[in-house]
Amino acid sequence: MTDATNFRRERIEKLLLELRYEVERGMMDRDIEEEIGFRFYVPISRNIPDGVVFCEFRTRPIPRYAMSPEDLQPRLKVVNASPAATRDDDARARFLADREDTERKQASNPSSDRTAPSEGS
């Protein structure tokens, strides 16, 4: 790993930690809403010819039981010049399994309705 790669990764991790602090503080102080989002595209992909990379930051309220300890810190992966296809397939399989698990939990718990109770009730 080069010094430039280390610098970039460390800078991104620092910025994500600062973002986390600002979001947590803003919500706890009721300065910002619970649902915010930011999306953008990186105009090139190493893995998909003529592809792009979709990036998303999103906040939304969820029930406490739906929290996962794996979601509590930034998970960055430094890529090398020749990524292995099997790693991509493994990551895709884990993502799909996690999504199915989340959908299954939401379907089995009717109280996980996404609508917030109205004020004053």
Image: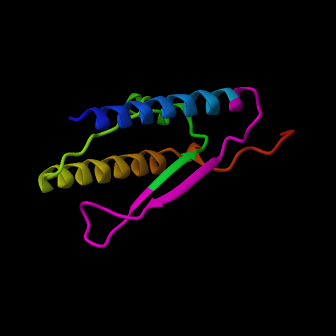
- The question of residue 43 being in magenta is answered with yes
Q: Residue at x 29, y 50 (%)?
A: 97
Q: Residue at x 20, y 53 (%)?
A: 88
- The question of residue 35 being in magenta is answered with yes
**Type of colouring:** rainbow
The quarter of the image holding the N terminus is top left
Q: Quadrant of residue 12?
A: top left
Q: Residue at x 57, y 34 (%)?
A: 19
Which residue lies most toward the front here?
3
Q: Which residues are magenta?
A: 26-54
> Could you say which is closer to the camera, residue 36 or residue 5?
5
Which residue lies most toward the right here?
120
The quarter of the image holding the C terminus is top right
Up-down relation of residue 45 to residue 110 (above or below): below
Up-down relation of residue 25 to residue 107 (above or below): above
Up-down relation of residue 45 to residue 76 (above or below): below
Q: Quadrant of residue 105?
A: top left
Number of numbered labels in the structure image: 0
Q: Residue at x 41, y 33 (%)?
A: 74
Q: Position of residue 15 (x, y in %)?
A: 51, 33
